[in-house]
Amino acid sequence: MILSARSRYAQNPIEEEDIVADGLVKKGKNVVRLNRGDPPVYFPTPKYIINAYISALREAKTFYSRAEGAHMLVEAVQKRYRRMYGINASEDSIIVTQGVSEALGFINSALINDGDSAVIFKPYYPLYVPLLKIYGGNPIMGSYNEASGWGIDSEKLSRMLKALPKSRARRAKYLLITNPSNPTGTVLSRRVLKEIIDIANEHSLLIVSDEIYDEITYNGARFTSVGELAKGVPHIILNGASKDFDATGFRIGFMLVPEHDKTSMAIKEKLADYAKARLSVNTPAQYAVAAAMSNESEHRKAIRSMVRGIADRANFATRLIAENSLFEVVEPNGAFYIFPKVDLKKIGFKSDAEFVDRLLKEEYVQLTRGSGFGAPSHIRIVALPPKDILGYAINKINEFCNRHSRSTGP
């Protein structure tokens, strides 16, 4: 067998129905794709960012840049975190990556030996678990609590970690949180975040916080970066240009390792080694993002406009979904996803995967199955399209559910 055993983990549920959807489009069907969180499709990347990219190209910034990240971008990240969160990160604390996915690959490769573990909360971003398993690790599964609005029960987390066999507890390397959350749209409160930090510190777990949606909050939610509260506690912050700067295709991410304890210093040095091993991130894109990040006035206008649009669409779609008794849904207050639970029994489906597949083939609406996020019986809806498209798609979802509900009725 030519393929490695670990290659079986290379999968992404978000894209698994793309071949079916593409085939339907070729047949002339109008497929509404609500599976991929790609803001520029509906909120074009702001012109000031596009112009910064064009300027970088015209200035011939097409060479290999510094492996850990172009100085201009690293300095822009430093200023952003100092301004927004009071975090003073040194230059060597920042590693620029090809999106957060590469950052997670670096982290797992640097930390995980075969048989090591990481604490991951369900529902999770679908690449967290495969990227851990590819490097020989195994997840220790915690859970967000749907009944409490997808929050984290810190007492339950503490009990779970204390109950781990000592041999496994010793091999647990990090605790990963997503704030705001993909797929639930939850923003963790400052109190809960502090409790999680304290628990991780008690169990000698490195904290990894994916904060890629940190400026996309609404409905009164207030975001707190882990770096504001984890002073003296080893942690890594993951972020990038994809969401806040509406530039997914640029593939610019970055990691911050702000602390200077022995553990943090060892981690940042090894992450820099991984950056050098892959040579460079897209150079003109780095200079474009650096210029965009430094242009505070233009960014404020762009992000406020985008967040207003996202909030309006997410709230609209959530209300429509909630009107159907076959769904239970928690209102999101961050990112741009809706993650309802489906009463599969009432509509005669064995799984959320079957629901998503049949919906696509019958109504030409593409969603993502919740089991791909570790939450069976759920579906993820991307609330980025305009309200007329969202309304049309949700109407199709309701028609689909009602039709199958009648066919399985008494």
Image (cartoon, helix red, strand yellow):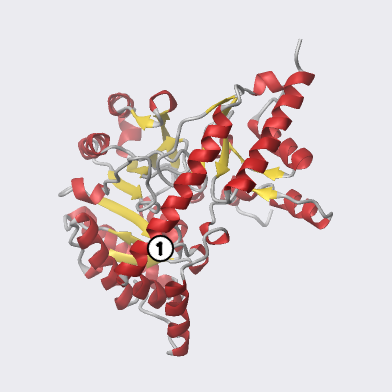
Image side of residue 270 versus residue 258, left or right: right
Expressed as whole percent of the image width and height from the top left, the position of residue 247 reads 48, 65
- Say above or below: 193 vs 271: above
Expressed as whole percent of the image width and height from the top left, the position of residue 29 reads 80, 51
Find the residue positioned furthest to the bottom: 59
| Foreground residue among 138 and 187 | 187
The residue depicted at 36 percent of the width and 31 percent of the height is 151
The residue depicted at 38 percent of the width and 25 percent of the height is 148
Expressed as whole percent of the image width and height from the top left, the position of residue 177 reads 36, 42
- Residue 395, quarter of picture: top right
Can residue 132 be seen in this snapshot? no
The residue depicted at 33 percent of the width and 48 percent of the height is 209
- Say above or below: 253 vs 173: below
Label 1: element kind: helix
Can residue 126 be seen in this snapshot? yes
Expressed as whole percent of the image width and height from the top left, the position of residue 210 reads 37, 50
- Residue 143, quarter of picture: top left
Image side of residue 82 versus residue 315, left or right: left
Residue matched to label 1: 302
Find the residue positioned furthest to the right: 27
- Say above or below: 126 vs 160: below
Kind of residue at badge 1: Ala
Crowd tier of the residue under label 1, counting other residues whose Cα lies within 10 Å: few below 14, some 14–19, many 20 or above: some
Image side of residue 87 versus residue 18, left or right: left
The residue depicted at 37 percent of the width and 72 percent of the height is 292
Quadrant for the C terminus, please: top right
Image side of residue 63 versus residue 225, left or right: right
